[in-house]
């Protein structure tokens, strides 16, 4: 692996894991406060810690890890080396994002930005928090341009050839990111910054939330797609098999570009001010975006089965035994996949209008995203780290470290079982999310919730131990014995059909995506500009 590219990738990964550690500390503390097991000293607030936890883990750990991972695969699959311009853009992006993270973290720690990781109005932070977010977003854009630059150069120098699957998927992920971050950029620049500086007196809350969720839902696919890249491209190689179908993998990524953006209203189903018709339309589109995940599940099962049968597996599930259970590079992402089955089912429940009325704003939703992003995605990223850090540092994974990786994965699953399991259950009993410790004056319902909150805190403590082990593993990987580690990038099965060229016509798919966004958002947005609820300053124009 190219040394200079290795440094860029490693910088992103180490930054990501530092954010994971800080976010983990904030996470375990807020969980214990909520469960009533500790009280915070020195005037530190629950919401302050909750914001630090959400921002550092959900926004910073993921973004840094993803950009590092994508750059690594582009370097490997598109010529073995990044072009100097692409690498420079990667570093500029890294510095801007790093600066934004440092500024944002300081503002949160000063309790000037306890607005949670979703940060939409009417909660107001210091303007510097929004400036910090803008730096992170602009930095990620520049990194994305670096990736596009590398990809375009490859396409130009390889006319008529289909790009390597990894690079195609990386570009798709960054296109999704570029389109969806427009919403949050508009919100931050035109609404939140002027409002928090006091240049305007009012803010349109509905518009702010809508712009946020225009970004906020595809954001979850920005987290998910790199995990899918590992599942499609890396895992077949790790198990010694092949990817079921290149065309199916590309189609599923294109469907994510098309369907993952015009669905933000499924976060706003309980919100007044948006007519039921537009909510209905976006729920239909939400159900469409489930399709590429079902295709992915099918493809994964097929890859596993093909491999098992090639080794002589018999019966419906005989292939199961042939998977490399003792290899953490497989085991951690596999647990992520397995848990994505109930996690995805929970998402389908959330998206169903009537059931959303039961679960919205309860701890059920928190349980949902701790299974999706904090388990399926996080465990996959951990699994990647076990080979990617050795690849870029010229080292090898030892069997002792592999064992610690398995222990870490098991601990993560056990902690999450208690934490997310209790969240789902107590959410159905009505316990609200994002609420500091309270028994509501010893109301019987709230008293009933308490044991679940304690179980959440216990799960959180187990998870914190797992975070610490992960950090120790990362340090261990940095000091592992020198040697060569192969970048595991799989190929499609021999009998797979030829991939149709239309799957790489970006214009077609982005065009459909733009049309759907316009159809799903134009009229409700126009309505929002005119919403002016008397006596409710939050619902005024800009
Ligand atoms: Fe979600 C809320 C709907 C997926 C994250 N979601 C959230 C929030 C987050 C989040 C962070 O409709 C909270 C935001 C906040 O703070 O308010 N979500 C969905 C739907 C899906 C979905 C329909 N979510 C995700 C993913 C996330 C994520 C992925 C992060 C990475 N979500 C919602 C809705 C809400 C919501 C509402 C708002 C709730 C409210 O009221 O506030 C779908 O994309 C899910 C599709 C997934 C599947 C599963 C496919 C399974 C696969 C694994 C195969 C396994 C194998 C191994 C092969 C259909 C691919 C098996 C081996 C064996 C041996 C068995």
Image (cartoon, helix red, strand yellow):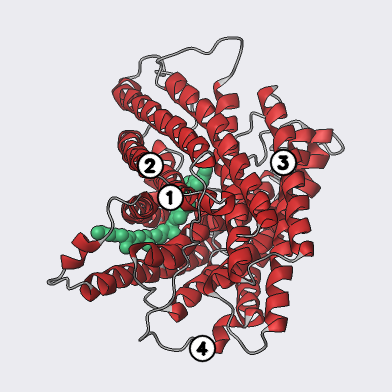
Q: Secondary structure at mark 4?
A: loop
Proximity of marks 2 and 1: CB atoms separated by less than 8 Å: yes
Count of all numbered marks drawn on residues in the image: 4
Which residue reaches farthest front?
A: 482
Work out how far the residue at label 2 is from the one at label 4, CA to CA, in angstroms.
39 Å
Packing grade of label 4 (10 A; few <14, some 14-19, many >=20) is: few
Tell me the tag on residue 383: 1
Label 1's element?
helix
Q: Is residue 265 visible?
A: yes
Across and down, in percent, residue 447 comes to 32, 20
What residue sits right under mark 2 in the picture?
405
Q: Quadrant of residue 164?
A: bottom right
- Left or right: 62 in relation to 186: left
Cα–Cα span, label 1 and label 3: 24 Å
Instruction: Pick out the residue farthest to the right.
Output: 199
Residue at x-position 46% and y-position 26%: 28
Q: Answer with mark 2 or mark 3, whichever residue precedes in sequence.
A: 3
Depth check: give the residue in front, 332 or 365: 332
Quarter of the displayed picture in which ligand 1 can be seen: bottom left
Secondary element under disc 2, as helix, strand or loop, is helix
> Disc 2 to disc 1, how far (Cα)?
8 Å
Compared with 525, 405 (above or below) is above
The disc, 2 or 4, on the residue closer to the chain's N-terminal end is 2
Question: What percent of the width, then of the height, locates residue 34?
Answer: 44, 22
Query: Which residue is outermost to the left?
Result: 315
Residue 500 got which mark? Answer: 4
Q: Are marks 2 and 3 in contact (CB under 8 Å)?
A: no
- Asked where in the image residue 85 lies, by quadrant, the reply is bottom right
Residue carrying label 3 = 98
Residue at 58% from the left image edge and 83% from the top image edge: 162
Q: Nearer the viewer, mark 2 or mark 3?
A: 2
Question: What is the x, y in percent for residue 30?
Answer: 49, 24
């Amino acid at each position: 692996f190219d040394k200079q590219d290795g440094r860029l990738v490693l910088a992103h990964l180490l930054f990501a894991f530092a954010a994971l550690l800080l976010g983990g500390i904030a996470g375990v503390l807020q969980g214990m406060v909520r469960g009533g097991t500790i009280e915070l000293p020195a005037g530190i607030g629950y919401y302050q810690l909750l914001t630090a936890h959400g921002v550092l883990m959900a926004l910073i750990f993921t973004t840094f890890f993803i950009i590092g991972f994508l750059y690594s695969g582009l370097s490997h699959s598109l010529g073995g080396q990044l072009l100097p311009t692409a690498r420079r853009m990667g570093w500029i992006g890294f510095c801007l994002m790093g600066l934004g993270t440092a500024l944002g973290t300081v503002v949160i720690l000063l309790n000037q930005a306890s607005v949670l990781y979703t940060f939409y109005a009417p909660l107001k932070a210091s303007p510097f928090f929004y400036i910090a977010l803008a730096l992170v977003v602009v930095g990620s854009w520049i990194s994305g341009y670096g990736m596009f630059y590398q990809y375009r150069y490859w396409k130009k120098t390889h006319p008529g050839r289909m790009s390597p699957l990894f690079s195609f998927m990386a570009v798709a992920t960054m296109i999704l990111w570029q389109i969806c971050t427009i919403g949050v950029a508009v919100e931050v620049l035109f609404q939140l910054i002027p409002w928090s500086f006091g240049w305007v007196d009012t803010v349109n809350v509905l518009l702010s939330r809508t712009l946020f969720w225009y970004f906020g839902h595809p954001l979850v696919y920005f987290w998910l797609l790199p995990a899918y890249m590992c599942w499609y491209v890396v895992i077949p190689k790790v198990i010694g098999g092949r990817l079921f179908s290149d065309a199916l993998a590309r189609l599923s990524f294109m469907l994510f570009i098309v369907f993952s953006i015009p669905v933000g209203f499924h976060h706003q189903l309980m919100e007044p001010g948006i007519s039921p018709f537009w909510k209905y339309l976006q729920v239909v589109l939400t159900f469409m975006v489930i399709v590429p995940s079902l295709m992915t599940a099918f493809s994964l099962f097929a890859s596993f089965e093909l491999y098992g049968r090639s080794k002589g597996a018999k019966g419906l599930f005989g292939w199961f035994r042939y998977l490399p259970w003792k290899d953490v590079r497989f085991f951690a992402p596999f647990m992520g996949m397995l848990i994505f089955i109930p996690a995805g089912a929970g998402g389908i429940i959330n998206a169903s209008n009537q059931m959303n009325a039961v679960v919205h704003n309860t701890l059920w939703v928190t349980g949902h995203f701790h299974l999706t992003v904090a388990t399926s995605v996080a465990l996959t990223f951990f699994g990647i780290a076990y080979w990617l850090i050795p690849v870029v540092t010229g080292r090898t994974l030892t069997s002792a470290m592999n064992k610690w990786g398995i222990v870490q994965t098991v601990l993560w699953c056990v902690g999450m079982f208690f934490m997310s399991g209790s969240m789902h259950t107590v959410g159905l009993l009505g316990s609200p999310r994002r609420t500091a410790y309270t028994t509501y004056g010893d109301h019987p319902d709230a008293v009933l919730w308490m044991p679940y909150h304690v179980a959440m805190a216990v799960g959180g403590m187990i998870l914190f131990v797992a975070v610490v082990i992960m950090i120790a593993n990362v340090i261990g990987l940095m000091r592992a014995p020198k040697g060569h580690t192969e970048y595991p990038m799989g190929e499609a099965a021999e009998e797979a059909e030829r991939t149709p060229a239309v799957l790489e016509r970006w214009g077609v798919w982005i065009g459909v995506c733009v049309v759907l966004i316009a159809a799903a958002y134009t009229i409700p947005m126009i309505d929002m500009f005119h919403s002016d609820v008397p006596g409710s300053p939050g619902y005024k124009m800009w």
